[in-house]
Amino acid sequence: MSENTPNILSPDEIKQAISTSIEQGTDIRENVRNLTLQALKTRKLSVDEIKSVIGPVIEGISLGAAKRAGEMKSAVTEGLAGLDEALSKAAEATQLALQQLTSQARDFSESDLDWALINLKRMEEEFLGTVSLVADSATDRIKQEMKDLVAHARRTGTDTGSKVAETMNLLGNKVSATLHESKVTGKDAAREMSVRLAALAGGILAGMADALHEKAEKLKKKD
């Protein structure tokens, strides 16, 4: 294996890293965000790949928060906020990738763009849906806290949802009108769009994650 090959964390490794970070109890939101980004940046940003990270992160938050006793509520709240921030960055990376791809208007039809936006919109629902799913198997106190946070998020929205909505509005209004109406669209075209978009977005997110990591390290050195 090349030295430049990224280390892809397994679901168990992600869960353990998040749980340990929550249990330690310092800078929970920032640590969960950064750990999530580190897990995402080694993957292509397809919905399935993102989903494979969301589950272990939320399980890790649940496990770590269960060991926080009186600070359980804040641990869950801060942990999920960190995950939301990471997913918002993933949505931002996808937005930038879509803008790059659709600037080559001849390559994609409007139906290709619509398909990409529909998949992007799934990101927030995967986040909230997975929290609800993990909550079902959590301890009573954590279950209730997670359920309450999901209910609140569905009423008020999430950072991830805001970024997705921004992307859909931006591209829906400014880009789709310039796209070529291809006569040949379908599963093959959608698959090609998916592969190219996921790979490009993954590269953009890796740059974001590295920049945030470097910033955090510099702040720690100053302290």
Image (cartoon, helix red, strand yellow):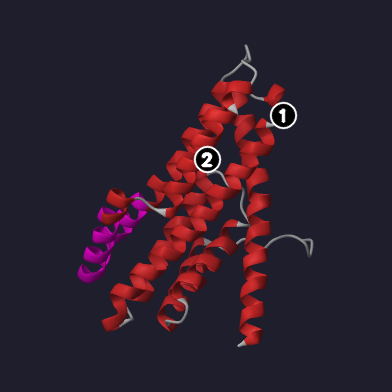
In percent of width and height, residue 52 lies at: 49, 53
CA neighbours of label 1 inside 10 A, class few (<14), some (14 to 19), many (20+): few
Check residue 176 for magenta coloring: no
Q: Is residue 68 above or below residue 161?
A: below
Quarter holding residue 106: top right
Quadrant containing the N terminus in the rendered view: bottom right
Quarter holding residue 199: top right
Residue plotted at (62% across, 32% down):
193
Of residues 52 and 110, which is closer to you in this image? 110
Q: Main secondary structure of the magenta part?
A: helix
Residue plotted at (51% across, 65% down):
33
Kind of residue sitting beneath label 1: Gln
In percent of width and height, residue 215 lies at: 65, 72
Residue plotted at (33% across, 81% down):
68
Task: Tell whether 171 sits left or right of 107.
Answer: left
Q: Which residues are magenta?
A: 128-151
Of residues 160 and 166, which is closer to you in this image? 166
Which residue in the protein does label 2 denote?
Answer: 167
Quarter holding residue 148: bottom left
Kind of residue sitting beneath label 2: Thr
Check residue 140 for magenta coloring: yes
Q: Which mark is residue 104?
A: 1
Q: Is residue 112 above or below residue 164?
A: above
Task: Tell whether 202 sits left or right of 5.
Answer: left
Callout 2: SS: helix
Quadrant containing the C terminus in the rendered view: bottom right
In percent of width and height, residue 55 lies at: 42, 57
Of residues 207 and 172, which is closer to you in this image? 172
- Which tag, 1 or 2, sits closer to the chain's start? 1
Decide if residue 103 is in sight here.
yes
Q: Is residue 170 above or below residue 149?
A: above
